[in-house]
Image (cartoon, rainbow, N blue to C red):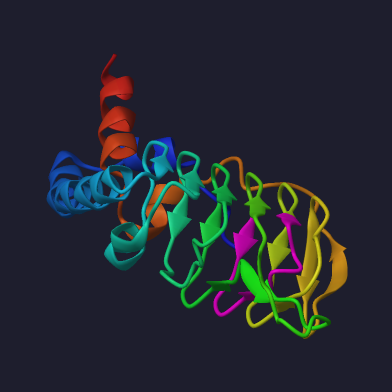
């Protein structure tokens, strides 16, 4: 297995030509993502720094959405009828669906019920995870494997899988060394800072 190279070291080791070749696409992504975040904030959401999200999510964002910094969201299927708080360094994969509302099935009036959810720092919700309203918290560093159906709260550092999701094992470390925004090419700020810090 190839040894991981820290992000800053990887950028600093590039030739000048290769560095500038990587600068333009990152700058274009930076402009696009800044506009998307501006739309979300204009709609009432609270969004941290260096966040990547789809335009479709930003367009429907409201005051119920709070996102920390350096978080990557690839899905727009997040129900914002109730508060959704997403921490920092969180990775939410493609086609993840988060539901925050349901009905009282034991009532003749079938009342509408809303719930909130908190997804703490360093979580990873892989492709096509489905989070039901009965889940109110996904703890720090938890991982939900691809296709999992989350029906209850997930404790910190748990790795869960299946339908309904069950604990596979505990995670030993969070992705503290990962530049999360680089996953989707939104790392213009980190990219330029890595180069300038090496020259200082």
Magenta region includes residue 119 = no
**Residue name at image x 80 percent, y 80 percent:** 107
Magenta region includes residue 126 = yes
Picture quadrant where residue 38 is located: top left
Q: Would residue 100 appear left or right of 13 to someone viewing this image?
A: right
Label total for image: 0
Above or below, 162 against 21 in this view is below
Q: Quadrant of the C terminus?
A: top left
At which x and y percent is residue 170? 85, 58
Q: Would residue 166 appear left or right of 147 to someone viewing this image?
A: right
At which x and y percent is residue 49? 38, 36
Q: Main secondary structure of the magenta part?
A: loop
Hey, which residue is sitting farthest front in the picture? 109
> What segment carries the magenta color?
123-137
Q: Would residue 77 appear left or right of 182 to someone viewing this image?
A: right
**Residue name at image x 25 percent, y 53 percent:** 36
At which x and y percent is residue 58? 32, 57
Above or below, 88 against 106 in this view is above
Q: Would residue 27 appear left or right of 93 to someone viewing this image?
A: left
Residue nearest the viewer, comparing 163 with 98:
98
Residue nearest the viewer, comparing 27 with 160:
160
**Residue name at image x 66 percent, y 47 percent:** 120
**Residue name at image x 49 percent, y 61 percent:** 80
Q: Quadrant of the N terminus?
A: bottom right
Above or below, 119 against 44 in this view is below
Picture quadrant where residue 190 is located: top left
At which x and y percent is residue 78? 49, 67
């Amino acid at each position: 297995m190839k040894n991981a190279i820290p992000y800053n070291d990887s950028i600093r080791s590039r030739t000048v030509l290769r560095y500038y070749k990587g600068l333009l696409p990152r700058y274009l992504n930076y402009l696009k993502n800044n506009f998307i975040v501006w739309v979300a904030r204009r709609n009432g959401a609270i969004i941290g720094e260096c966040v990547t999200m789809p335009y479709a999510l930003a367009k429907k964002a409201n005051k119920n959405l709070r996102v920390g910094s350096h978080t990557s969201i690839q899905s727009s299927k997040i129900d914002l009828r109730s508060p959704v708080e997403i921490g920092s360094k969180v990775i939410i994969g493609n086609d993840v669906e988060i539901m925050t509302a349901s009905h009282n099935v034991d009532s003749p009036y079938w009342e509408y019920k809303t719930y909130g959810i908190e997804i703490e720092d360093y979580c990873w919700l892989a492709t096509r995870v489905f989070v039901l309203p009965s889940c109110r918290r996904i703890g720090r560093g938890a991982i939900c494997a691809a296709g999992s159906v989350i029906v209850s709260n997930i404790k910190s550092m748990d790795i869960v899988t299946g339908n309904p999701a069950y604990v596979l094992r505990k995670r030993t470390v969070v992705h503290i060394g990962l530049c999360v925004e680089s996953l989707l090419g939104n790392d213009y700020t980190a990219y330029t800072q890595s180069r300038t810090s090496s020259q200082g």
